[in-house]
Amino acid sequence: LYLMSKANGTVYKVVGAPTDQEMHLEVYHMYQPLWDELKPEVKQKVSMGNYERLFDAANKKVRAWEAEHVKKRTTLRTLSEAVIGLSV
């Protein structure tokens, strides 16, 4: 699979992960005209707002699951006693 940069005409052989910074930035450059047209509040919602909303909600769900399912925290002492019978 090959990818040609519209910005500079460079042809890249795509075999997996990008091999250099220019390949990483290619999509960024492709979307630049769209970003230039967006209002600042829309840019913020798309670039940071979604991240904050999704990760904040996920963090609450994870903590709720932990509170329900993790009854006792394992300490070094209890782990040592359980695994090798060592009293620390």
Image (tube, helix red, strand yellow):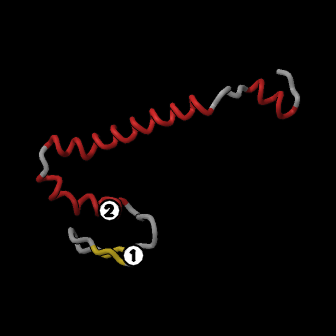
**27 or 74: nearer the viewer:** 74
Tell me the residue at 40%/73% (across/down): 14
Residue found farthest to the front? 68
Residue with the mark numbered 1? 13
Q: Quadrant of residue 77?
A: top right
Q: Quadrant of the N terminus?
A: bottom left
Left or right, 1 with reference to 68:
left
Q: Residue at x 17, y 53 (%)?
A: 35
Identify the residue at the far top of this view: 88
Quarter residue 59 falls in: top left
Q: Secondary structure at mark 2?
A: helix
* Rendered location of residue 54, percent (x, y): 37, 41
**In this rendering, would 46 be left or right of 12?**
left
* Rendered position, 53 above or below 77: below
- Where residue 10 appears, as percent x and y from the top left, is 28, 73
The CA span between labels 2 and 1 is 13 Å
Residue under the image location 57 percent in, 32 percent down: 66
* SS label for mark 1: strand
Residue 80 lies, in percent from the top left, at 81, 29
Q: Are marks 2 and 1 in contact (CB under 8 Å)?
A: no
Q: Is 48 placed left or right of 79 in the picture?
A: left
Per the image, the residue denoted by label 2 is 22
Q: Quadrant of the C terminus?
A: top right
Residue 8 appears left or right of 37: right
Tell me the amino acid under the disc marked 1: Lys
Disc on res. 66: none
Which residue type carries mark 2? Answer: Glu
Query: 10 Å neighbourhood of mark 1: few (<14), some, or many (≥20)?
Result: few
In depth, the one of 70 and 81 nearer the eye is 70
Mark 2 / mark 1, whichever is N-terminal: 1
